Image (spheres, rainbow, N blue to C red):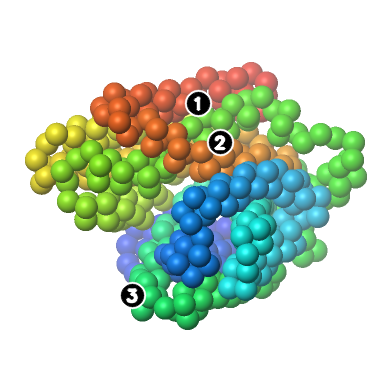
Amino acid sequence: MTTAPPATAAPSPDLPASGASRLLHPDPTVRRLARITLLNTVGSGLSLSVGVLFFTRFLGLSAGRLGFALTAAGLCGVLASVPAGRAADRWGSRPVLVALVALTGLGTAGYTLVDGYPAFVALACLVAAADRGSAAVRNALYAEVLPADKRVAGRAYLRVVTNVGLCLGTGVGAIALQVDSRAGYLTAILADAASYLAVAVLFQRLRVPGWSGVASGAVPGTASGAERAVEVGAAGGKRRNPALRDGPFLVVTALSSVLALQFAMLEVGVPLWIVQQTDAPRITVAGTLIVNTVLVIAFQVRATRGTEHPAAAARACGRSGLILAASCLVIGLAHGTPAALAAVVVLVGVALQAVGEVLGQAGTWALSYDLAGERAHGAYQGVFNAGMSAALMIGPAVVSTAVIGHGLVGWAALGALLAGAGLAMGPAVRWARRRGAVPA
């Protein structure tokens, strides 16, 4: 990392080696963040499981109209990330995050009252903008409350908690799906809205060095969160976004966005491939999600080890790209094989994808912080999150176009794209080193 940890740094966020304490993080700040994350993602899992059916069956939206609304909302999410990050630098990550999370909760509750398509589109855009903006600000908050050399491992732990929360929320949402009533769907959506509002309260209570008047958590030799905000605020009207003028960081963001196509590959490409291009049983689709979730939970924290230096993080991205390319080839081989063998081949390919995913996430997280150093984390995380949001928005169209109808050639092309993005991280980091953005 670019900055040495303070003398009063929190305990290491690596998981303990034995005992029931494996499930609890040793750092109290990460534990508090984990509780917040769990509450938030259980609510999100609830809403995700029922949202599409509620919008189409009870609001009367056609698939085409819903798709347009969600695309427009995705674009708003991309556009909101950068200004949200700048706002965090100007006014502080915690107050901005609290406001955005609360707005997301109120907007989510609004789905139960919306009447008419234009109102639905406007509300979907508002919720997406607040949600994606809060994601950027939340990553900046992690930079303020966690020591520099513990951020990536801390985020890995929180990602494990995210997967657990989404699984729990989806499981509860299955009850609403089984009941299949308007009241059940409304209850699930309102529970998600309530979780956002509760999370906003918990973030408000989170102690952030510099903003609570205590700078003991600040890194020696750097400005506290409050001091940085004063500096950014004083120059806000005169200085352009520093992240948008940082060439190496923009390249890393673009390459990370390409690697993020793997999520569309798993959520869209693989299910369509299984159903339309293989003889594997349809239940294999659920099996792929289970395999991915279990492996991410098991290995995400471990994957962060060895990514402490930017060059090591870049190598992790390179390995990720190659493994993702291999997973594409394996999944493509399922076409034309017997049903049972096709299912096994696809599951092996998804297992490789999960390995590439945890390595890629660890590497790109590290670089998003390393290349920003201790400078304007809100601005840098805002730009980085905008790239991720763009990948999530266009990913389904890119992946489905590449693999459906093109067979193994399409999968090979997607794999080559992912491998190229991962391997290009090394030159990008060396460029940053030449410019002095990261330590030699």
Q: CA distance from mark 1 to mark 2?
A: 9 Å
Q: Earlier in the sequence, mark 1 or mark 2?
A: 2
Between 185 and 439, the one nearer to me in the picture: 185
Upstream in sequence: badge 3 or badge 2: 3
* C-beta proximity under 8 Å, tags 3 and 1: no
| Alpha carbon distance from label 3 to label 2 | 43 Å
Provide residue 258's location: percent of width, then percent of height: 48, 32
Which numbered tag is attached to residue 178? 3
Q: From the viewer's side, name the closer residue of 114 and 262.
A: 114
As helix, strand or loop, the secondary structure at mark 1 comes to helix
Q: How many marks?
A: 3
Q: Residue at x 68, y 43 (%)?
A: 79
> Looking at the picture, how far across and down is residue 143, in whole percent?
64, 50
Quadrant housing the N terminus: top right
The circle drawn on residue 367 is 2
User: Residue 425, labelled with which disc?
Assistant: 1
**Mark 1 Cα-neighbour bin, 10 Å: few <14, some 14–19, many ≥20:** many
Amino acid on which the number 1 mark rests in the picture:
Met
Q: Would residue 164 be seen by someone viewing this image from the given angle? A: yes
Asked if 176 appears above or below 385 in the picture, the reply is below
Q: Is residue 149 visible?
A: no
